[in-house]
Image (cartoon, coloured by chain):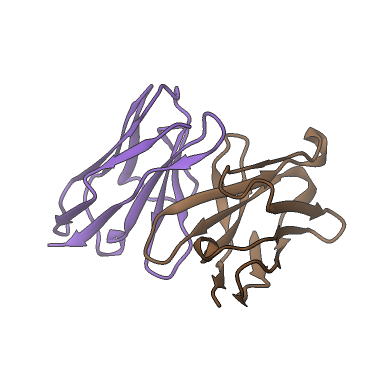
Chain colours: A brown, B purple
Amino acid sequence: EVQLVESGGGLVQPGRSLRLSCTASGFTFGDYAMSWVRQAPGKGLEWVGFIRSKAYGGTTEYAASVKGRFTISRDDSKSIAYLQMNSLKTEDTAVYYCTRVRWSSDFDYWGQGTLVTVSS
Amino acid sequence: DIQMTQSPSSVSASVGDRVTITCRASQGISSWLAWYQQKPGKAPKLLIYAASSLQSGVPSRFSGSGSGTDFTLTISSLQPEDFATYYCQQANSLPLTFGGGTKVEIK
C-alpha cells in the first residue's frame, strides 16, 4: 500500500525557515517524481513544485510564488522528499501536501497534509 | 501560465441526479487534464487522468471527457459519498495549475 506521511509543519514567524519532510512507503520511491501542493485555509489547490527522479536528472521546478525561497530535495536511500521553506510570508500559510507524480504529470497519491502557519 | 476555469462554483443536487462539471483551459492542453475529489479535512483523491481515463478503484459512475480547452466531469448517478469539492488540473505545461473548484452540495 502506497503511503505518504508529511511532518514538520507548525507555527513560524514571518521571515523564518521551516523544513517539511515526506516519508514514502509501499513503492519504489526513486522511480517517481515527487511534488508538493498547498492549500490555504478555505481556498483551492496550488502546485508548489516538484523534483524529478534521478533517471530524469533529479531536477526541480517551482511555482513563481515560491521560486528562490523554497527548495525541494530528495533522499532516495531513505524514501524521503523535503521541502525547505525560507523567508516565509504570511501568505505561505497553508496545508502542504506531498504527492507522487505520475508519468502524465498528475498526482495519484497524496499525504494527509501538514499545516504551516506563518504569523507573528 | 494556463488558467483553469471551473463552472459552476457550486451545485446543489440530490442523490441519484446526474451532475456535470465543466473545466475550461485558457489555451489548448490536448488531453492533459486530471480531476480530483476532496472531502472536508481530507487530501484530494485522483478520479480521472488524461481527460477520460478512470483511476483504479474509482467507481464507474464517474467519467471524464473533452480535449483541447473544454472538459467535463460527469457523475452519472450521485451517491451520498460524492458530496465533495471537485478540482480539475492541467498537466500539459509548467506551472501545473488547478481550477478553482466546484462544490457539490446536498439539495
Q: Vertically, is A114 above or below B84?
A: below
Q: Vertically, is A2 above or below B92?
A: below
Residue B51 in the image: state x and y as whole percent: 41, 32
Which residue is at the front of the view, B107 or A82?
A: A82
Residue B101 in the image: state x and y as whole percent: 33, 50
Horizontal side, residue B9 vs residue B28: left or right: left
Horizontal side, residue B64 vs residue A74: left or right: left
Residue B52 in the image: state x and y as whole percent: 40, 33
Quarter of the figure that contains the N terminus of chain A: bottom right
| Residue A85: quadrant of the picture | bottom right
Which residue lies most toward the right here? A77
Residue at 25% over, 59% down: B79
Which residue is at the front of the view, B4 or A69?
A: A69
| Residue A33: quadrant of the picture | top right
Q: Vertically, is A87 above or below B96?
A: below
Residue at 38% over, 21% down: B68
Residue at 56% over, 78% down: A120
| Residue A20: quadrant of the picture | bottom right
Horizontal side, residue B101 vs residue B28: left or right: left
Residue A86 in the image: state x and y as whole percent: 70, 60
Residue at 37% over, 68% down: B40
Res. A28 in view: no
Number of labels in the image equals 0
Which residue is at the front of the view, A119 or A44?
A: A119
Res. A92 in view: yes
